[in-house]
Amino acid sequence: MELARNLKIDSVSRLTPTPPHQIGPDRTVADAVALMKEKNVGCLLVCDAGRLVGILTERDVMVRVVAQNRPLSTPVVECMTPDPITVSSKESIRAALERMQLGNYRHLPVLDEQGRIVGVLSIKRIVHYLVEHFPGIVCTQPPRPKKSPPKREGA
């Protein structure tokens, strides 16, 4: 099967997004980091009264807390990415990839038809999908496709 066709046809739900782990906006960054470590995830969805208000990623913690020498007691709301871009579980993998590429995101919250949070799609899931379904295309690519070796190897 053709890669471009499958990316248009297969839906985000086929990637089995990871369960959504949530934190409140008033909780501290220290609480968020502890929860990320406990759940072994790279992001948390920030929800207030059941409504998605933001996303807090490892990158947010590094750039907006650590790099700025802010204390870990900083509330999550002050360093999260507000109103995150989302994807529907019924949308194509291609649509998710386009959103990730345009925004330089590694995680997208996944919503169902009613707008409820059902998971988080990571770029890692997409890479696993590509390797699993198209090993011939993915695994045979040279590390630097446009660069040839400086001299001939072998006999």
Image (cartoon, rainbow, N blue to C red):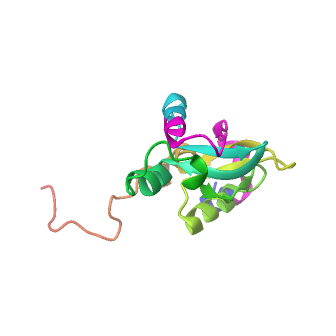
Which residue is painted at 87% across and 48% down in the image?
Answer: 114
With respect to residue 50, does 136 lie above or below? below
Which residue is painted at 78% across and 42% down in the image?
Answer: 50
Side (left or right) of 41 relative to 49: left
The answer to whether any part of residue 2 appears in the image is no
Range covered by the magenta-colored residues = 8-33
| Residue 138 colored in magenta in the image | no
Quadrant for the N terminus in the image: bottom right
Side (left or right) of 115 relative to 52: right
The quadrant in which residue 23 appears is: top right
Task: State the image coordinates of residue 137 (x, y, percent, origin top left).
Answer: 49, 55
The answer to whether any part of residue 91 appears in the image is yes
Which residue is painted at 58% across and 69% down in the image?
Answer: 102
Which residue is painted at 75% across and 55% down in the image?
Answer: 91
Side (left or right) of 121 relative to 87: left
With respect to residue 72, does 82 lie above or below? below
| Residue 15 colored in magenta in the image | yes
Task: State the image coordinates of residue 4 (x, y, percent, origin top left).
Answer: 63, 62
Task: State the image coordinates of residue 154 (x, y, percent, origin top left).
Answer: 14, 55
Quadrant for the C terminus in the image: bottom left
Q: Residue furthest bottom?
A: 146
The quadrant in which residue 150 appears is: bottom left
Q: Residue furthest right?
A: 114
Q: Which of 105 and 90 is in front in this view?
A: 105
Task: State the image coordinates of residue 117 (x, y, percent, origin top left).
Answer: 75, 44
Q: Which of 123 and 86 is in front in this view?
A: 86
The quadrant in which residue 39 appears is: top right
Q: Which of 1 and 63 is in front in this view?
A: 63
With respect to residue 29, does 34 lie above or below? above
